[in-house]
Image (cartoon, grey):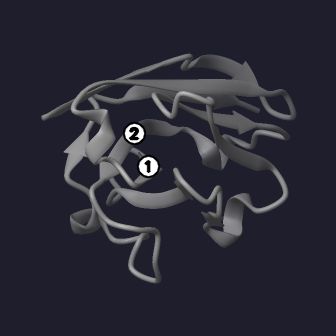
Amino acid sequence: QVQLVESGGGLVQAGNSLRLSCAASGRTFTMYTMGWFRQAPGKEREFVAAIHLNGGNTYYTDSVKGRFTVSVNNAKTTLYLQMNSLKPDDTAVYYCAAARRTLGSDSYVQNFYDYWGQGTQVTVSS
């Protein structure tokens, strides 16, 4: 099993930045891909970004390209999401996820992932 704990959420004004972290513990050697999803009030959970832990390849949804950067620490146990130029539409609960599969064309799909964190709230005010 892998446990994931997100942190770093909060309230920020539009145009500012925030960095989310996700600490992984347990059988982390089974992880190959980690990602971020978000869920806004009244909406379905959507893919944000993913990273392949061994190759460093990344994958972003169009709405965050150029603004968000996903990365992982050298030990591959902490996932980050650097969010710049935040917009009110970025307001959501952000979830960290981990998969035992290699990053691929289906990495934007929720059931690609095996483990999930509890989420951290990000609120962007206008």
Structural crowding at the residue carrying mark 2, measured as other residues with C-alpha within 10 Å and reported as few (<14), some (14–19) or many (≥20): many
Q: Along the horizontal axis of the image, is 61 left or right of 121?
A: right
In which quadrant of the rendered view does residue 44 lie? Answer: bottom left
The residue at 68%/71% (across/down) is 62
Q: Along the horizontal axis of the image, is 1 left or right of 99?
A: left
Q: Name the residue under label 2.
A: 96
Amino acid type shown at disc 1: Met
Image marks 1 and 2: residues in contact by CB distance under 8 Å: yes
Q: Name the residue under label 1.
A: 34
Q: In which quarter of the image is the C terminus?
A: top right
**In this view of the protein, which residue sits in the foreground, 83 or 15?**
83
Structural crowding at the residue carrying mark 1, measured as other residues with C-alpha within 10 Å and reported as few (<14), some (14–19) or many (≥20): many
**In this view of the protein, which residue sits in the foreground, 125 or 28?**
28
Against 16, residue 83 (above or below) is below
**In this view of the protein, which residue sits in the foreground, 75 or 17?**
75
Percent of width and height locating residue 106: 39, 79
- Give the mark, 1 or 2, whose residue is nearer the N terminus: 1
The residue at 27%/57% (across/down) is 100
